Amino acid sequence: MDRLLTKAQVKQLVTYSFAHTARLEADGKFPKRVRLGTGRVAYVESEIQDWIARRIAERDATGS
């Protein structure tokens, strides 16, 4: 079963601000959050890890 991560945990993993991850999410470039209740959201850990892995793969493919 997947773990749910808080926004603070996601920020530690990807080092983006909450506002930036929200912009990326709105543009379809970041995993969508899961609404847990009023004012409470989380992210699926495996989706965040996959997103990170894709960034690394893109870096390696371009040599940057």
Image (cartoon, rainbow, N blue to C red):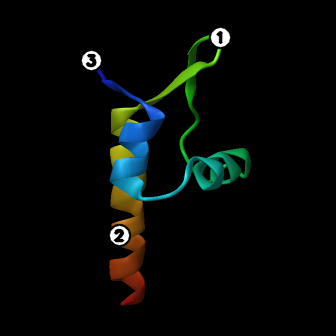
The correct choice, above or below, for 47 with respect to 30 in the image is above
Task: Report x, y in % for residue 63.
Answer: 36, 90
Residue type (three-letter) at the residue carrying disc 2: Ala
Q: Which residue does the image show at 42% across and 39% down from the upper left?
A: 8
Q: Is residue 39 visible?
A: yes
Q: Residue farthest to the left?
A: 1
The residue tagged with tag 3: helix, strand or loop? loop
Q: Secondary structure at mark 1?
A: loop
Of residues 53 and 17, the one drawn nearer to the viewer in this rendering:
17
Location of the N terminus by quadrant is top left
Residue 48 lies, in percent from the top left, at 40, 44
Horizontal side of 31 relative to 2 (left or right) equals: right
Under mark 3, the amino acid is Met
Q: State the image quarter where residue 17 is shown.
A: bottom right
User: Quick one: label 3, few (<14), some, or many (20+) residues within 10 Å?
Assistant: few
Q: CA distance from mark 2 to mark 1?
A: 36 Å
Label 1 – label 3 distance at C-alpha:
24 Å
Q: Quadrant of the C terminus?
A: bottom left
Q: Which residue is mark 1?
A: 38
First in sequence: mark 1 or mark 3? 3
- Badge 2 element: helix
The residues tagged by marks 2 and 3 sit, at their Cα atoms, a distance apart of 25 Å
* Mark 3 lies on residue: 1
Type of amino acid under label 1: Thr
Q: Earlier in the sequence, mark 2 or mark 3?
A: 3
Label 2 neighbourhood size at 10 Å, few (<14), some (14-19), many (20+)? Answer: few
Above/below status of 5 relative to 22: above
Residue 59 on image: x %, y %: 39, 78
Identify the residue position indicated by label 2 in the image.
57
Of badges 1 and 3, nearer the viewer stands 1
5 vs 38, left or right, is left
